[in-house]
Image (spheres, grey):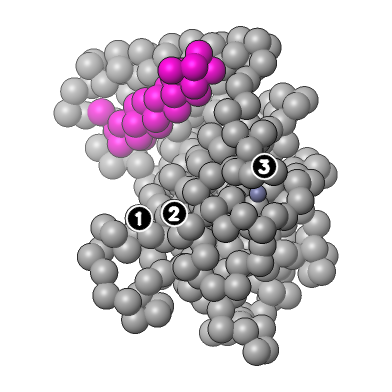
Amino acid sequence: MDIDPRFSTNVPAAQSAGPFDNLPPWAQVGVPGSGSGPELAPPPSDKRRVWVVIAPDKAGFSLVGAADRAAHQLETKLRDVQIQVLSPDSKLGGSILSALDFDHLPAKPSPALVAEQIRHLLEAVRPAPDDISFTVTDLELETPAGAAFVLWYVLEPAGLPNSVIFSTHHLDPAAWGEPMAEELRLATIERRLAAAMINVLGLMLGYQACQDPECYLYRPIERVRRLDYLTGFVGVHAELLNRRPTAEQEQQLRQQLAIHQEVLNSLEVQKAKMGDFTPPYILLGIEESKKEIDRIERQLDEANGS
Ligand SMILES: [Zn+2]
């Protein structure tokens, strides 16, 4: 097993091989997979897979955190989707994101230019034909003539069906000269991004837009602050709320939970053995496993009505 050089500091070769060989491919945290793309089981038949690719330009890891949390809200709000996040710090993302080359784009690139970049990226991701791909970046995109802002471009006209690029540039209070503490600023971007992605995804999944200003499926989003009021599924869309997983889905959640707990235990054992020499990818794996366990437990709690 090759260790990603970024994570190889202080890892003696003898210790880096072996202990993870029997983990499933997706648990090989921080290690790029072999071959040209990730090997993932297909999503359950009642779910649509949504790739959320987090591609920071200048914002770096502050965008990664905010976009990651926003992406996971898609899954908690819309149960018929399965989210697969790729980010610079994710197990699959590091090598795949190298397909992107924002540095050589002109300022405020057109959707066609951005689509060209994303095409390379999707070649590495190899989504199934029905999969949806969202790319999230802080790169400022070309603003259409006569518009004050652009929040996303649907890339189908550029030849990429089921693919949308979101830019957080205009979601950022700083872009409007609004002074704000850093934490609040990031929380605002996160909330707006989640609302924008749920809005777009809901319509892509075939739900109709509505005129309830609190509803995630409100259209049009004619000003950025509009997103601040989208807080749930209400009115004609209330039935999208509180949809509980079926018994079969709950069963799958419990299986996933068991796998993640097993992986976590195995990583914790390694950490205990290696002490100060524990490589960062194991620590990252522990973090990721805990996050997944937490997320699944929350879903199970909701399923049980608590
Ligand atoms: Zn609605």
Look at label 2 and name its amino acid.
Answer: Arg
**Mark 3 vs ligand 1: CB below 8 Å:** yes
Q: Is residue 56 left or right of residue 75?
A: left
Q: Position of residue 44 (x, y in %)?
A: 72, 24
Tag 1 near tag 2, CB within 8 Å: yes
Instruction: Name the side, left or right, on which 45 lies relative to 16.
Output: right
- Above or below 61: residue 58: below
Q: Which residues are magenta?
A: 278-306
- Quadrant of the image occupied by residue 37: top right
- Which mark sits nearer the N-terminus, 3 or 2? 2
Q: Is residue 122 above or below residue 249?
A: below
Check disc 3: other Cα within 10 Å, few if <14, some if 14-19, many if 20+: some
Which of the two labelled residues, at mark 3 and mark 1, occupies the earlier sequence position? 1
Q: Which residue is mark 2?
A: 191
In front of the other: 6 or 81: 81
Secondary structure of the residue carrying numbered label 2: helix
Q: Check residue 235 in the rendering and tell me which mark sits there, or answer none.
A: none
Label 2 beta carbon less than 8 Å to ligand 1: no
